[in-house]
Structures are given as structure tokens and as C-alpha cells.
Image: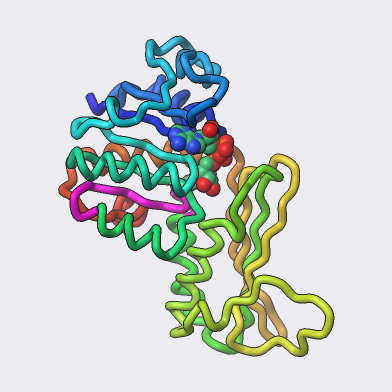
């Protein structure tokens, strides 16, 4: 039995993780964290997630429940996730982190902490997106510089970071495959008279609308044709189930920073 702590357990992703954990036979919820002052503190995590009572109370006190024998699964904010990961590293434990929006400095700290903790970090735990990232590298290399790359993503109105971590990752994969420096060629908006599109730019655009769980399209367009790769997440359980696969994967691993590609053996 693998023991798990969910951070952000009353959030949109955290509550689906708790619900999926309630059905898993080999994984057990042993701790549930929420932000200080959150109205669900003190309540049962299973009841908050809308499933059966699980006997695990939501708390904001992370230090006592983040132990070396538990896997911390975090879908929270960058700051909260780093605070929790520091505790995981100090305990020599393991973590699955789905939080997005980390800065470059924060990513460096995660890589540093992963020398003491086994960490799976993924901006998107869906199997479909993980495979799509592979396909994108192939498409970009094969199509080459004559195809204009434009990436669009749509998410629900509550999403805080933009572009999505997945869109950012897709742009990184395409830029690497084409030998471009993403920082120099990324375009995040066009307005007024930006002039003709340059061949090297990679457009990344974010739409926010209603309750869209997550959609990403990468378009490669040239004179005469356009080829597009689209992924649509229909619900959050696709991310939760992928994250549970990552927890099973990381359970037996030594310290290191792992990706969803590693989890799927791609
Ligand atoms: P949400 O706002 O619904 O949930 C986040 C939860 O974290 C909230 O309940 C909040 O109270 C809690 N939290 C904040 N600070 C905390 C702290 N110090 N300790 C414990 N809990 C704390 O957001 P969401 O839609 O569930 O998304 C959360 C994160 O996961 C975002 O960064 C989002 O982009 C990311 N996400 C990743 C994937 C993926 O597959 N990797 C999928 C969906 C969302």
C-alpha cells in the first residue's frame, strides 16, 4: 500500500485526486493539506471531495504529515508547492507536482531539491498530452522552418497563470526541435501594426472561457496547407489518473527529477 498526502485537497484538482484515491486499491490517502484560513479546514477530505468519508481531516499544518514514507501530491500554487517540496526533501521523501506557473528561479530550486527527493514534475499529467509532446517534436523537425507555428490554449475563467504550463512546454518542445531560442522568438500577442509575421516566431495565445477544462492546439501553416494537432481534456480525472500513475512510478525511485515521459517510458 502506497501512502499519499494531497496538498490543495479542496481545490478543483485536489478534490478529484482525493476522489480517485478513494477508489484505488494500492494507494491510500493519509493526509490532506489546505491553505491557512480555508473554510474546509477541519472537515473530512473525502466528504469535501464529494465521496465517502475517508477519516482524513484537512489541515494546514504540513510539517507533521509530510514524512519520508508518504508521497506528497501537489496541485496548489508555486509558493505552496515549493514550501511542501522543501519539507519532502528534508524528509528524503517523494512528490508528484502538477502545479504550474513556476518562475525560472523556482524551477532551479525544484531541480536542486530533487537531489534529495524523488520528484515527478509535469505541467500536464494526461497520457494524451504526453504522447502529443513527442509527436510535436517529430512534426516540427519534419516540417521545418517553412511552416508557421502558432499555439493556442483555452482554459476556464478561474485559471491564474498564462500561458498554460502545457502550452509553454509545447512551445519549448517545438523551439528545441527547430533549434530556436524560445525566449527570443515567442510572441504572446499581436495588436495594431506588428507587420508581417517573421518565419522564426512561435505564437502562444491564451483564451479564458467559462468552464473549459483544457484545450491546446499547435498549428503548422505554410502556403497551401496547415496541419494542426489538438488535445482536449474532457474532465479533470484524466489528469488525476495520470498523477496516480506518476505516484506508483515514483514510489520505488531514488532521488531525481522525473517527467511524465519517464512515467510512461517514452
Ligand atoms: P484550485 O485553485 O482549484 O486549487 C488549488 C488549491 O490549493 C486551493 O484549494 C488552495 O486553497 C490550495 N492551496 C493554496 N495554498 C495552499 C497551501 N499553502 N497549502 C495547501 N493548499 C494550498 O486550482 P486547480 O484548478 O486545482 O489548479 C491547481 C494547480 O494545478 C494550478 O497550478 C493548475 O495550473 C495546475 N493544474 C495542473 C494539471 C496537470 O495535469 N499538471 C492539471 C490541472 C491543473
In the image, residue 13 above or below residue 178: above
Residue 161 placed where, x, y %?
59, 54
The answer to whether one can see residue 13 in this image is no
In the image, residue 262 above or below residue 37: below
Q: Front-most of 198 and 157?
A: 157
Q: Residue at x 38, y 60 (%)?
A: 107
Asked whether, in this view, residue 20 is left or right of residue 200, the answer is left
Q: Is residue 207 magenta?
A: no
Residue 131 placed where, x, y %?
44, 57
Residue 150 placed where, x, y %?
64, 73
The tally of labels here is: 0
In the image, residue 171 above or below residue 112: below
Q: Which residues are magenta?
A: 114-129
- Quarter of the image with the N terminus in it: top left
Residue found farthest to the front: 37
Residue found farthest to the right: 192
Asked whether, in this view, residue 167 is left or right of residue 114, the answer is right
Amino acid at each position: 500500500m502506497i501512502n499519499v498526502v494531497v496538498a490543495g485537497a479542496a481545490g478543483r484538482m485536489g478534490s478529484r485526486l482525493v476522489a480517485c484515491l478513494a477508489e484505488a486499491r494500492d494507494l491510500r490517502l493519509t493526509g490532506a493539506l489546505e491553505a491557512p484560513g480555508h473554510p474546509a479546514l477541519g472537515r473530512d477530505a473525502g466528504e469535501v471531495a464529494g465521496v465517502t468519508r475517508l477519516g482524513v481531516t484537512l489541515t494546514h499544518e504540513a510539517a507533521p504529515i509530510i514524512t519520508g514514507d508518504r508521497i506528497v501530491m501537489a496541485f496548489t500554487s508555486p509558493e505552496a508547492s515549493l514550501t511542501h517540496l522543501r519539507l519532502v526533501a528534508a524528509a528524503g521523501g517523494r512528490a508528484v507536482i502538477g502545479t504550474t506557473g513556476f518562475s525560472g528561479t523556482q524551477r532551479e530550486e525544484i531541480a536542486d531539491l530533487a537531489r534529495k527527493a524523488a520528484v515527478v514534475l509535469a505541467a500536464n499529467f494526461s497520457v494524451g498530452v504526453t504522447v502529443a509532446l513527442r509527436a510535436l517534436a517529430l512534426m516540427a523537425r519534419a516540417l521545418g522552418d517553412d511552416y508557421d507555428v502558432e499555439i493556442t490554449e483555452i482554459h476556464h475563467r478561474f485559471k491564474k497563470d498564462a500561458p498554460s504550463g502545457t502550452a509553454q512546454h509545447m512551445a519549448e518542445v517545438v523551439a528545441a526541435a527547430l533549434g530556436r531560442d524560445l525566449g527570443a522568438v515567442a510572441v504572446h500577442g499581436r495588436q495594431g501594426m506588428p507587420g508581417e509575421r517573421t518565419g522564426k516566431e512561435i505564437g502562444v495565445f491564451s483564451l479564458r472561457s467559462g468552464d473549459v477544462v483544457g484545450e491546446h492546439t499547435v498549428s503548422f501553416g505554410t502556403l497551401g496547407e496547415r496541419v494542426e494537432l489538438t488535445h482536449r481534456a474532457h474532465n479533470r480525472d484524466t489528469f488525476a489518473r495520470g498523477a496516480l500513475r506518476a505516484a506508483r512510478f515514483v514510489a520505488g525511485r531514488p532521488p531525481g527529477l522525473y517527467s511524465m515521459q519517464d512515467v510512461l517510458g517514452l
